Structures are given as structure tokens and as C-alpha cells.
Image (cartoon, grey):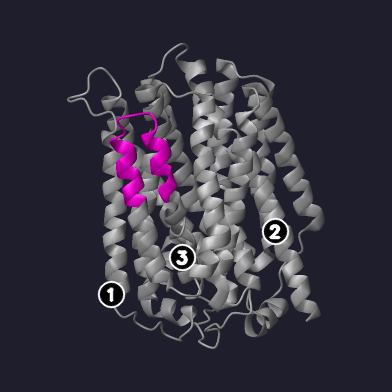
Amino acid sequence: MESTKKDLYGLSHLFVCVFLFHFSAFMVIPAITDVTMAALCPGKDECSLAIYLTGFHQAMTGLGTLMVTPLIGNLSDKYGRKALLTLPMTIGIVPIVILAYNQSRPFFYAYYCIKMFTGMLCDGSMQCLSLAFVADRVGEGRRASAFGVLSGVSAAGFLSGTVTARFLSTASIFQISAAVAMLAATYMRFFLTETSKETTLLYDTNQPLCSCPSDDNSSSPKLQPFRKVPSLHDMIHLLKSSLTLSRAAVVTFFISLGDSGLHASLLYFLKAQFHFNKDQFADLLLILGIAGALSQLLLMPSLATMITEEKLLSIGLLASCAHVFLYSISWASWVPYFASIFTVLSVFIHPCIRSTVSKQVGPDEQGMAQGCITGISSFANIISPFAFTPLTALFLSDNAPFNFKGFSIMCSGFASLIAFTLSIIMRATTPVPVSHRSFHDIRQEHV
């Protein structure tokens, strides 16, 4: 019981770190579009240079994340989650400090280059390591709920950062964001306690996240830890070792492709179509944050005990399709606000995928497995700009072949629709049991 309390205490510190990290990161989102436009195309509501630079940044960050995140996840399996969490939580401070000091064009380009480098190390690593930390301390039957709570804490950070940005000047936003990022890194180093195999196993067998009935008696295969730095070959065979893992990876790719296209295009679309500014961006993001936080903290933990993860995943993907298509055909400035309400259901997607993946591997492979899924998502982020950035720039310009400014957003909705279709197939097909052989043996068979 004493060990259990210690584990829950450790999770509470992780939640504080995640909240502060996302509070800092998302505080700058409502302002960054205006800062980018002011630095590159002063006085304009449409700027192809800004769109292409955003797409290039997204592709390069995705490429770096694809290569770095599985490595960091695997190293955390060996050296500990806290040791590796220090990396994204400290270097992520640097680009924010640059814009906190000055937002002129030279400083924007400095921010742009450094942010691209730090994004390679930070964007996927924070999520991967946080999920692995939670998986270390939570029983399998309650991981969907635990991952939902973690996502809810992230959404609460998003919400708090957006509310703060709504009432601050642009210059103050970056200054306060930098200060909160420093506080998050300091808190993590002083208060977060490292996970250990002993407490993980004790908690996993005896103490689920809540007292609800669970299926913790069903065991998942425990794979042998990697003895060296993982290669692309290792990651491919890890995913192929389980049909469930393979299906989750394909669904992750398409939903990430659609999300990436939406996020890269939406704010520029709203600025060109309805002349949105920082405050209106903040209002929209505020609705997204409230809907996401309430759903993940209150609704999902309850539904996860009554509905299977596969069904929750399909519900979330269907809602995602609906809100993306509504964005694309927005005919009035109130439509994007209405469409954002579907976030109440679409936030189920990633916790369900991550929970499904975590149950397919043992405690020594949580970082590696989560890193692989993050890598798949990053691969989609690399491809997305090549498809959606030219479409966004073309249909927001005066040279569009036809008048449909939201065409690129609608195309990203079709990627989400493919993910939804695949999730139906995944749910309808009886999962093939994963072999109880060690992953080391599986690898040897392919050598």
C-alpha cells in the first residue's frame, strides 16, 4: 500500500510537469500566426511565404521526430524516464526566449531555425516519455482511462495557456511562456521521481487506476528489452510481431496525416476567409481546449469502463471527420466555433490507440513501443506538407482554379475518413493473439 501511494504521488508530479509544459507551449499558438505574418508579409491577410515556411518546418520537424523519438523512448527504457524528460523540457525553452526578446524579422528567422531543431527533439519525446511513465505505474485494464487523464491534463494546459494568451499582449505572451517553461523544467528536476521495475510490477498486478472491475488478469506478451540502439529494421519487426500493433500503426498514420494537414492550414484559412486575429484564434482554441479537457478528464474515464477501446476509437474518428469537413465548408465566422464542439468526441482517438499499443508489450518496451507509434505519426507529418501546403497556398491565393478556400482542409478530412474506415475493419476482425515468444527470438528469425 505504501508503494502504491508513492506511485500515485509520482503520477501527480508528472501531471503537474505535463500541465506546465503544455501551458507554456500552447500559450504562443494564438499569437504565432500574427507574428509570422507581421515578420514576413506586414499588413497582409494572405502570405504564401508564411504557408510554405510553416510546411517546411513541419516536414523537417517530423523527419527529426521520426528518427529521434524511438531512440529516446528506447533509451528511457534503459536509463529512466526522468533522465530523458530533461531533454525536451529544457531545450524547448530556447526558441520561446528569442521571441520574448524581439519579434522583428531577423529574430523571427532565428526563432524559426532553432525551433525547427528543438522541435525534432521535443515534439514527440514529451508525449512518448509521459505515456511510458504512466504505463510503468498503471495496470493494463485501466491504461485507457489513465492515458485519457494524461491527455486531459495536456488539454487543461492547452486551455489555461489559451485563456492567458487571450488577455495578454503579444510581447507579454512569449515572456510569460518562457518563464512557465523554466518553471516546468525546474519542477520536474526537483519533484518527479524515477520509475522502477519493482514498483511497476507491484502496481500492475495489485492496484489498478480505480476500483472498477478490470481485465488485468489477462496478460500481454512481455518482450525482451533491446540490447542495442534500435534500427528501422527493429521497429518494423516490432510492429509486425503483433497484428494489433500493425493495425494501430496504419490508423495512426492516416489520422496523423489528416490532423497535420488541418493544423497547418486552418489558422491561415481563417485569417484569409474571415480575417481572424490573435483574439479570435484564442477564442476558437479556447472552445477546443474546454471541450477536450472536460471530455478526457470526465467523460472518457467513465466510457472506457463501459465501451471497448476499439469502439471509442471509431467514435472519435467519426467525430474528427465531421469537424474537419465542417471547417472546410465554413460559410460564416460562427461555423468554425460550432465545428470545434466535435472535439468532445475526437479526443478519444490518441488515448485509445496508445492504450492498445501499451498492452501489446512488456514493461521494458513501453518507451520503445510508444516511440514507434510517435515515429509513425512523425512520418505522416513529413508527408503532409508536400500534399497540403501547396494546396493551401494555391487555394488561398488569387490564382485558385476555383473558389474554395477550404479545399486543402477538405482533403485532410478524407485522410481522417480513411482512418475511420480502417478502424471499423480493425474492430470487426478478431484480433490475432500475439506470440508469447520474446521479441529477441522474433528478430533472430528474420536475420
Which quarter of the figure is the C terminus placed in? bottom left
In front of the other: 418 or 309? 309
Marks 3/1 in contact by CB < 8 Å: the verdict is no
Report the residue at 46% width, 11% height from top.
43
In front of the other: 26 or 282? 282
Q: Badge 2: how crowded within 10 Å, few (<14), some, or many (20+)?
A: many
- Residue 44 as seen in the image, left or right of residue 411: right
Could you tell which of marks 3 and 1 lies nearer the N-terminus?
3
Q: Is residue 17 located in the magenta-colored stretch of the structure?
A: no
- Residue 402 as seen in the image, left or right of residue 158: left
* Amino acid type, callout 1: Ala
Q: Which residue is mark 3?
A: 352
* Amino acid type, callout 3: Cys
Could you tell which of marks 1 and 2 lies nearer the N-terminus?
2
Spatial separation of the CA atoms under disc 2 and disc 3: 20 Å
User: How far across and how far down the image is residue 89, in percent?
Assistant: 67, 47
Q: Which residue is mark 2?
A: 14
